[in-house]
Amino acid sequence: MIELRWVVAGVIFGMLLSTVFVPPTRKQKILPQPHDSGLFHTDSGCVRFVADEVPCSAEPDSLNLLASK
């Protein structure tokens, strides 16, 4: 018959093998770069970014100040 110790040993061995050979998957957020013109898939759909070159100003402005206006 089937002995309990071999069943437990098999379960432990299987868990050990699955943690060693099947690493966990991680989702990394990818930020678009100015030269990327392809589609980016998000949870709510797809987006495409287009970069336009603009002239630089003499004084630096914080993006937080610009967004709050």
Image (tube, rainbow, N blue to C red):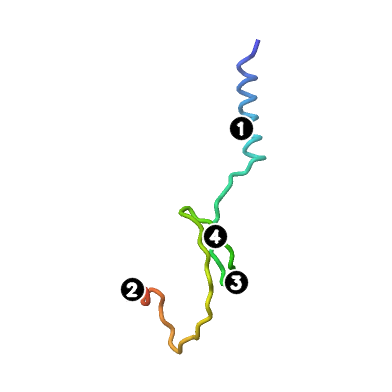
Q: Which residue lies furthest to the left in this view?
A: 69
The residue indicated by pointer 2 is 68
Identify the amino acid type marked 3. Answer: His
28, above or below 54, in the image: above
The residue indicated by pointer 3 is 35
The residue indicated by pointer 1 is 15
> Which image quarter is the N terminus in?
top right
Q: Distance between the Cα atoms at labels 1 and 4?
A: 36 Å
Q: Disc 4 vs disc 2: Cβ atoms closer than 8 Å? A: no
Q: Disc 1 vs disc 3: Cβ atoms closer than 8 Å? A: no
Q: Which of marks 2 and 1 is nearer the N terminus?
A: 1
Q: Distance between the Cα atoms at labels 2 and 1?
A: 52 Å
Q: Disc 2 vs disc 1: Cβ atoms closer than 8 Å? A: no
The residue indicated by pointer 4 is 40
Neighbour tally class for label 1: few under 14, some 14-19, many 20 plus, Cα within 10 Å:
few
Neighbour tally class for label 4: few under 14, some 14-19, many 20 plus, Cα within 10 Å:
some
Q: Earlier in the sequence, mark 2 or mark 3?
A: 3
Q: Earlier in the sequence, mark 1 or mark 4?
A: 1
Q: Where is residue 38 in the image (x, y as percent from the top left)?
A: 59, 64
Q: Residue at x 55, y 66 (%)?
A: 32
Mark 2 or mark 1, whichever is nearer to me: 2
Q: Looking at this view, is 3 or 41 the one in front?
A: 41
18, above or below 26, in the image: above
Q: Distance between the Cα atoms at labels 4 and 2?
A: 27 Å
Q: Looking at this view, is 42 or 7 the one in front?
A: 42
Q: Earlier in the sequence, mark 1 or mark 3?
A: 1
Identify the amino acid type marked 4. Answer: Phe
Q: Distance between the Cα atoms at labels 4 and 3?
A: 13 Å
Mark 2 or mark 3, whichever is nearer to me: 3
Residue 23 numbered mark, or none: none
Q: Position of residue 44 (x, y in %)?
A: 46, 54
Identify the amino acid type marked 2. Answer: Ser
